[in-house]
C-alpha cells in the first residue's frame, strides 16, 4: 500500500493533529523510564542503594501495568481514549513529581512507585494508539510512528534535561520541576487536539446506538471491523506477538534504562554518558518514522522481523568494544533505531491482524507483555551488574532473545483484509487464527 497516496494525504489534512497530540501524551507515559538512569547515581549516593534497588520502581510499574493493560484497553473501547488520556496526564505528572519526596526507606520508595503505577494505567500505549487507529487507514503505519515518536522525544530530552536539573537544583527539585512543566505542556496539547472516533461515539450516541463509522474512509459502516475479544485471544498470532513484545521489552528496555550506567562503567563522564544516551531518542525518531513508512509499503511482519535484529549489533558493540566512544555512539544509535520500532510494529500488526472492533482490549493484552518486559528487564540488568560486576551477561542474553523475537514475527501468516467487509471477513469469524 502506498504510504502517501491521496487517501493518506486526506487523512493527514483532516486528522494530522491527533498523532502529534497522542505523541506528547505517550511521552508522559514513559517519563519515568527514560529519566531513571539520570537519577540512579544521586539516589545511590544519598541512600546507599544498589542499582537493582534504585530500579525496583520500574518493576512495580511494569507488573501493575501488565495487570491493568487489558481492563484499560476495554475501558478505552467503551469510554473513548480522550477521557482516559486526560485523566492519566494529570495523575502521571503528580505521581512523578512526588518521587522527589523519597526518604531513603525502601518502603517509602515502593509506595511512591505504587502511586506512579496507578497513574501509568491511564497513559498506556493503548490509549494513544486507539485514537490514531480510528482516524487513519491508508497511512496508519506512519501515523503510529508519529504517535510513538513521543517515546523517542522522551528518550532524547529527558536524560540531559534531568541531568541539568539535578546539577542545578538537586534530584528532589528535578523530579518536581520536570513533572510539573512537562505535565502542563502535555495536558494543554491533549486537551486541545486529542480525540478519536470512539470519543465522538461516546459523546454523541446513546449506548445502544451503532458505533461511529471510520472517518478516514468516510464510509457508512455498522461498526468498526475486526475480531471479537475471544477470537483474538484464541489466535496463534496473538501469542506470537505477545512473545515478540515481551522479549523485546525485557532485553532492549533493560539495556536502554541502564545505558547511562553502562557507559559510565566503561569510563564515560556523566554528561558524555547522558549525551550518548540521548542519541537513543534522536535515532528512535528516525527509526519510528522510517519504520512507519516501511510498514505502509511492505509486509509488516517482515519489516518487524528485520527491525528486531538491529539490537544484536548494538549489543555486540557494547560487549566487545564498549570502552570506545565511537562504539558507544554507534550502539546508542542502533538501540535507538530499534526502540523506534518496537511498539510501532506490535501496534500496527495488531490493528491489521485483529481489526479495530476490539483493538483496545487486544492490544492491551499485548501491552501487558511489554509492561512485564519493562518491569523485569531493567531489574534483571541491574541485578546482573550487582552480581557479576558488569552488564556483559545481560548483553549476551539481549542478543539471543532478540533473535527469538525476530523469528516470532517472521513466522506470522498474511493478515486478513478488513476493508473488504465493514463487519469482519468470514474467514476471521470461522477461523480465529489469522
Image (tube, rainbow, N blue to C red):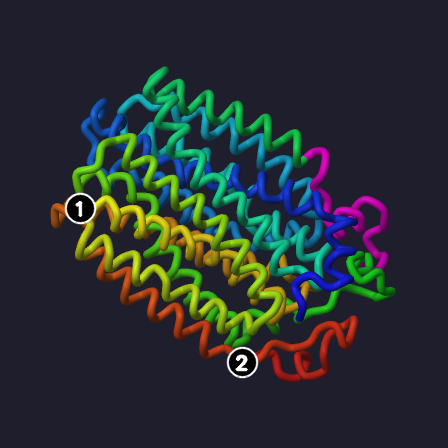
Residue 43 among magenta residues = no
412 above or below 101?
below
Part of the protein shown in magenta? 191-211
Q: Nearer the viewer, mark 2 or mark 1?
A: 1
Q: Which residue is more in the foreground, 405 or 430?
A: 405
x and y percent of residue 151 in the render?
49, 45
Place of residue 137 in the rendered image (x, y in percent of width and height, measured from the top left) = 71, 62
Q: Quadrant of the C terminus?
A: bottom right
Left or right: 330 in relation to 228? left
Q: Residue at x 40, y 64 (%)?
A: 308
Q: Secondary structure at mark 1?
A: loop
**Circle 2 crowding by C-alpha within 10 Å: few under 14, some 14–19, many from 20:** few
Quarter location, residue 142: bottom right
Extreme residue toward the top, this view: 169
Q: Is residue 90 above or below residue 122?
A: above
Instruction: Using the rendered view, name the quadrant where residue 54 is placed.
Output: top left
Q: Nearer the viewer, residue 48 or 353?
A: 353
Please report whichever mark, 2 or 1, sits nearer to the chain's N-terminal start. Answer: 1
The answer to which of 327 and 400 lies nearer the viewer is: 327
Residue 202 is left or right of residue 43, and the answer is right
199 in magenta? yes
Task: State the residue at coordinates (32%, 20%).
Answer: 167
Is residue 421 rendered to the left or right of residue 38? right
The x, y position of residue 72, in whole percent, is 58, 50
State the separation of the CA atoms marked 2 and 1.
42 Å
Residue extending farthest left: 388
The residue that mark 1 highlights is 323
Label at residue 413: 2
> Picture quarter containing residue 418?
bottom right
Residue drawn at the location 30% of the way across and 46% of the way down? 329
Amino acid at each position: 500500500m502506498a504510504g502517501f497516496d491521496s487517501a493518506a494525504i486526506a487523512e493527514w489534512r483532516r486528522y494530522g493533529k491527533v498523532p502529534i497530540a497522542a505523541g506528547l501524551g505517550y511521552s508522559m507515559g514513559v517519563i519515568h523510564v527514560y529519566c531513571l538512569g539520570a537519577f540512579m547515581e544521586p539516589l545511590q549516593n544519598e541512600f546507599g542503594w544498589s542499582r537493582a534497588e534504585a530500579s525496583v520502581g520500574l518493576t512495580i510499574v511494569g507488573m501493575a501495568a501488565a495487570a491493568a493493560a487489558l481492563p484499560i484497553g476495554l475501558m478505552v473501547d467503551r469510554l473513548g481514549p480522550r477521557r482516559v488520556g486526560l485523566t492519566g496526564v494529570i495523575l502521571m505528572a503528580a505521581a512523578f513529581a512526588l518521587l522527589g519526596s523519597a526518604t531513603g526507606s525502601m518502603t517509602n520508595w515502593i509506595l511512591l512507585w505504587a502511586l506512579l503505577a496507578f497513574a501509568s494505567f491511564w497513559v498506556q500505549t493503548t490509549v494513544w494508539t486507539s485514537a490514531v487507529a480510528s482516524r487513519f487507514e491508508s497511512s496508519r503505519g506512519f501515523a503510529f510512528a508519529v504517535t510513538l515518536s513521543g517515546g523517542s522525544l522522551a528518550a532524547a530530552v529527558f536524560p540531559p534535561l534531568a541531568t541539568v536539573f539535578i546539577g542545578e537544583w538537586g534530584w528532589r527539585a528535578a523530579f518536581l520541576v520536570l513533572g510539573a512543566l512537562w505535565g502542563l505542556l502535555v495536558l494543554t496539547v491533549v486537551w486541545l487536539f486529542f480525540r478519536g472516533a470512539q470519543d465522538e461515539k461516546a459523546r454523541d450516541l446513546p449506548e445502544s446506538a451503532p458505533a461511529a463509522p471510520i472517518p478516514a474512509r468516510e464510509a457508512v459502516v455498522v461498526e468498526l471491523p475486526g475480531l471479537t475479544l475471544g477470537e483474538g485471544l484464541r489466535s496463534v498470532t496473538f501469542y506470537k506477538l505477545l512473545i515478540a513484545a515481551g522479549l523485546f521489552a525485557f532485553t532492549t528496555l533493560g539495556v536502554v534504562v541502564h545505558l547511562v550506567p553502562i557507559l559510565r562503567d566503561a569510563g564515560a563522564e556523566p554528561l558524555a554518558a547522558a549525551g550518548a544516551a540521548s542519541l537513543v531518542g534522536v535515532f528512535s525518531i528516525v527509526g519510528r518514522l522510517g519504520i512507519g513508512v516501511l510498514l505502509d509499503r511492505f509486509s509488516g511482519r517482515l519489516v518487524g522481523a528485520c527491525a528486531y535484529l538491529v539490537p544484536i549489533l548494538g549489543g555486540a558493540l557494547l560487549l566487545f568494544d564498549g570502552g570506545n566512544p565511537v562504539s558507544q555512539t554507534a550502539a546508542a544509535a542502533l538501540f535507538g533505531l530499534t526502540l523506534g520500532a518496537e511498539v510501532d510494529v506490535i501496534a500496527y500488526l495488531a490493528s491489521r491482524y485483529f481489526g479495530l472492533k476490539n483493538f483496545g482490549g487486544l492490544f492491551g493484552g499485548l501491552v501487558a507483555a511489554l509492561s512485564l518486559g519493562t518491569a523485569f528487564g531493567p531489574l534483571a540488568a541491574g541485578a546482573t551488574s550487582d552480581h557479576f560486576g558488569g552488564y556483559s551477561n545481560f548483553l549476551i542474553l539481549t542478543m539471543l532473545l532478540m533473535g527469538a523475537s525476530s523469528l516470532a514475527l517472521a513466522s506470522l501468516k498474511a493478515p486478513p483484509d478488513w476493508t473488504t467487509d465493514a463487519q469482519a471477513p468470514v474467514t476471521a469469524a470461522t477461523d480465529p487464527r489469522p
